[in-house]
Amino acid sequence: MALKRLNRIVQLSHTVSLTRPLHGSGCGLQLGAATQTEAPMESPRAVFRTSESEPASHGEQHIGQFYTIPPSQVKTIFPHGLPYRFQQQIKTFNEACLMVRKPALELIGYLKKADPAHPSVRYVLYGERGTGKSLSLCHALHHCSLQDWLILHVPDAHLWVKNCKELMASSYHRARFDQPIEASVWLKNFRVTNERFLKEIKTSQKYIWSKREFTDEGRPLGEIVDQGVTRVKNASDAVGVVLKELKAQARPGSYRLVVGVDGVNALWGRTTLRKEDRSLIDPSELTLVHNLRKMMKNDWCGGAVIATVTQTGSVFTPSSAYLPQELLGKEGFDFLDPFLPVLVRAYSEKEFESSYQYYRDRHWIQHHTVDSLKSILCVSLAPPAGHTEEGKKELLFLSNRNPAALERLCAFL
Amino acid sequence: MAASIAKFLRPWSPGVLPARWTRYNPYYLEPEPSKEVYRIPVTELTDEQKAAQELKAVRPIKAAPPGLTSSVFSDPTVSKFVNMMMEDGDKVLARSIITQTFESMKRKQVEKYHKAPATEKEGIECNPYTIFHQALENCKPIIGLISIQKGGKYYQVPTPLTDSRRRFLAMKWLITECRDNKHRRTHMYEKLSQELLAAFMNEGNVIKRKHDMHKMAEANRAFAHYRWW
């Protein structure tokens, strides 16, 4: 396992990053300095923070800069959406700062221009391991949430196709399987994000859960969610009902729906779950996967589907695969086709510099050779002149500008 | 006699050629990992450095051990600690435990730093390397005990310790403490980070063990003359 850990850092840094040449990077920085109200005290040459906390107003001049998400919004919009290491970072730094990057800006631009009357467009974020696909998805969802869209966020679809402790046969369909724990957890988090919509949207038909329990037509959707959370046995079916209702009622006049799925290739891959006779279960035989697949079709209007294809966490896929064709397979690709692919690359030089300055500002990079701000107790270890850049050059080399590799390297330095 | 010395000085290579061996001919030179040495331009070399460079052209060089790097982040104390913690030659696992320890220590301290008011921020140490070095320093015993046999009985006699022995004892105590006195489900890196932070503040079981050693030495003061060196 430790070998895998070190190998991961090596793999992350071996990713081929085709960085764009920085045309006018000098003017970009100057423009940044001119339009920013807030500048860090220690280094006037690299401005790494921006005071714009609305993703809608982020533009080209904000690329490479960090914007803060207020803690209240983090709790409501991302109860389960952020990657684990980012959650740890939020806890340590006491703030949630996300970097504005080109793929996310591109996505937000498309979302702004999209016509609600047209069928929903499917966007697929792809890229090598550790380049920032999940956080770009979170950035786009933050924007949608502030624009008052309904957020349907599946933080990791891979969790639904592996390591399921309780698998039970579905009561609704004989050949399918239910996953009560995963479904109830997801419903709880869904409720936290979309409280106000759950009161407004009404069911369009009667749903019978068992001999004595049923939900009438015209009741608020919140009741279905409560039913799924309290009666864990019906949770997967409750999820199916919620998805069906939201899709049916997402019209240009009413709310706008965004479906964010991280690891959509799990829906068309293989599972590690087995039936009682030890034969492998196909993803289509799982209720949750079956219902989510229906959401990914573009036969509804008034919203968007943003998906990520990732090898991390996927089962039975080679670690070098990162393209949508390789990860989705023929079936998945044909289902999602036509989609808009968005490539997420490793950091550019400016973004790397910005990330490095942010870690220094937050006192995260502590090693004395990396010119730490806090040199109170390091006076005796003060680096000789010319030594301060050594650490930074080494970080650049070791991480190959890969965001995840840089984060893991700075963690112990 | 001249013939025997000449025999010693002629080029010698072992019959079987291993990749690395602890018993090299003293003739072999140590490898030089630091980049600074190679960056000095030829004109600025001192006479000794020039002589060393010329010697490298004629003498063979020992194989570099696996823990030797030219990285600016390498620390010999940390490398020694990793080697001591290593079991069955699994250096990757030992090193990953140490990096996780540093990360968890840094996380705790940085979180405390960001939540503290401005007056207390100066006092919080966030650098895991300084914490590690300081904690190790606090765990090193000043005086040790050795077992000396006199008149059929063995006595614990107080004795001064060399620097390397003190460092070894501090590291050994830390590792054994973290291996033995932890809950079955606590990870090594968690326990180690707790112990290091406690030792940094001069608390914890390892500091207690050091104080016990000092008290024993103080108590056995009378037997100090049993030592004849």
Image: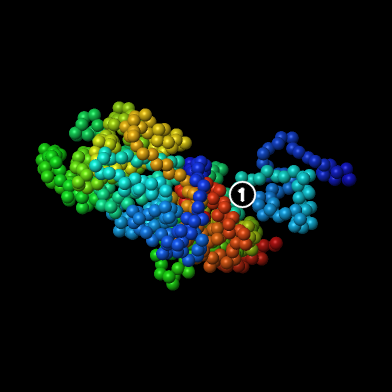
**Rendering coords of residue A352 (x, y %):** 49, 52
Q: Residue at x 33, y 53 (%)?
A: A56
What's the colour scheme?
rainbow
Tell me if residue B207 can be seen: no
Q: Residue under circle 1? A: B69
Residue occupying the far bottom of the picture: B119
Of residue B110 and residue A327, the one placed in the foreground of this image is A327
In this rendering, position of residue A238 left or right of residue A277: left
In this rendering, position of residue B161 left or right of residue B88: right
Q: Residue at x 32, y 51 (%)?
A: A143
**Rendering coords of residue A389 (x, y %):** 58, 57
**Rendering coords of residue A130 (x, y %):** 44, 45
Q: Quadrant of residue B149?
A: bottom right
In this rendering, position of residue A185 left or right of residue B202: left
Within 10 Å of disc 1 (Cα), the crowding (few <14, some 14-19, many 20+) is some
In the rendered picture of this protein, how many numbered marks are placed on residues?
Answer: 1
Q: SS at mark 1?
A: loop
Of residue A342 and residue A346, the one placed in the foreground of this image is A342
**Rendering coords of residue A1 (x, y %):** 47, 42
Q: Residue at x 15, y 43 (%)?
A: A203
Q: Residue at x 51, y 63 (%)?
A: A43
- Amino acid type for the residue under numbered disc 1: Thr
Of residue B52 and residue A328, the one placed in the foreground of this image is A328
Identify whether B75 is placed above or below A127.
Answer: below
Tell me if residue A24 can be seen: yes
> To which chain does the residue with label 1 belong?
B
Identify whether B18 is placed above or below A190.
Answer: above
In this rendering, position of residue B161 left or right of residue A88: right
